[in-house]
Structures are given as structure tokens and as C-alpha cells.
Image (spheres, helix red, strand yellow):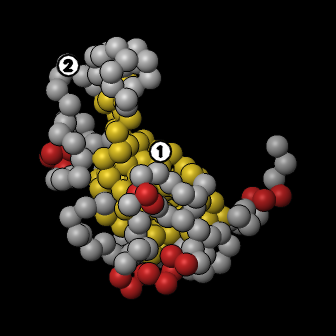
Amino acid sequence: SPRKDNHLSRVVRIVPNESPVGTTSEDEGDLSSPPAPSSSSSSSKFASVDENSNVSIWIAVQVPSSGDTDPGLSPRGSVKLVRSAWFCPFETGPDADLSLTARTSDICFNPADPNQYFLAADTGQILRGARFGGETLFPRYYGRFGPPVTSLGVSLLAQGCLLSGYRDGTVRLFTMDSETPAAEWCGFIDIQH
């Protein structure tokens, strides 16, 4: 479908989505990704999300230059961008109605498990999901309806912690096992630089 060939709304975020050290896409069970590159080439995974929550997973692969014959490369180029997966978490199931109203402003992945993603919504909630495997995650949502979530971050040091920023200047710290914030800080909107 043309909708799945590229984003049809504004791309709001592009983030790295690397596998944990020592694994390949085959280890992760990602059947929608191409096989892991051979040792003679290198690659990087990225995710892009648009404001309608459509997520694309891209692989940038360094390949030997093949002159001008490969339409996926710029002339004499050596890096090719390949779309390996596409999904929209709101497209089917009980969350289908939310896709008509929620807009996404950010995405991040759990560094301990790059299969898990978090989407920031303008409804004030954070959606948690899995790219593949049909894994049911709890909680599915963090936070409550309120000011739009504008940014997300998962701690590399304190595993299991998710930090979110909101349009009204509030910052909330969630643990990944609770839908209510563990801590909240307000009033950051009035800070002068």
C-alpha cells in the first residue's frame, strides 16, 4: 500500500534502534528485518515516527559501491537505506478509536529490550508496545489524560525508569511496572535560559 511506502504526515522523531551488543536481528526474532549483515559490511537501525503514530524501522547498510546500477544508492554511493518494518500501534484492536484523535510527538526504545517502544501522545499518555512477538506488556499506558507529552527518555543507568516531559513544563518519572508516576516536578516552563 502507498501508505506503507513512506510517511504521509509530518515525521516528528528519528531515533537509533540498535540491538543489544552481541545480538543480531535474527537473535531478536524480528522476522520482518533482512538477515543480519555479513562481517564485511556494517549497518545501523533507526526508527522514524510521524505525528499519526506510524513507525518505520530503517536499516542503513554500507555496501560496496556498484557504480550507477543500484537505484537504492546515490551515484557512486556506498550507504543504502532499507525499510525493514512498518507498524501503527493504533491501527487495530481496542485502541483503534484512539488513532483518530491521538497525535504522537516522540518515540523511544527500551535499551535493555529494543523490541519495546514508548510513544508520547498529545492526550497526555504514553503508549507502551512491542514491535513483534505479540507480547502483552503491562502497563500498556502510562500517565493520565492531560497536557501533551512532548519528550521521552529511558534511563541507561537506572534500568526500568522512563522520564517524560509535558507541554506545561511538568516532568514525570515512571517505573516501567507502574502506570502512575513515581515522582513529578512542576514549574519548569517559567525557567529562563
The answer to whether marks 1 and 2 mark residues whose Cβ atoms lie closer than 8 Å is no
Residue 118 falls left or right of residue 25: right
Query: Relative to 104, is 125 above or below?
Result: below
Query: Relative to 137, is 27 above or below?
Result: above
Q: Secondary structure at mark 1?
A: strand
The amino acid marked with disc number 1 is Val
Q: Quadrant of residue 144?
A: bottom right
**Picture coordinates of residue 94, whole percent (x, y):** 39, 85
Q: Which mark is residue 109?
A: none
The answer to whether one can see residue 64 in this image is: yes
**Residue displayed at 29% across by 22% down:** 63
Name the residue that disc number 2 marks.
40
Which residue is nearer to you in this view: 134 or 157? 134
The amino acid marked with disc number 2 is Ser
**Picture coordinates of residue 189, whole percent (x, y):** 78, 59
Quadrant in the picture for the N terminus: bottom left
State the CA–CA distance, disc 1 to disc 2. Answer: 25 Å
**Picture coordinates of residue 186, whole percent (x, y):** 71, 66
**Residue displayed at 43% across by 57% down:** 2
Which residue is nearer to you in this view: 81 or 140? 81
**Picture coordinates of residue 176, whole percent (x, y):** 39, 66
The answer to whether one can see residue 164 in this image is: no
Name the residue that disc number 1 marks.
15
Residue farthest along the front direction in this orientation: 69
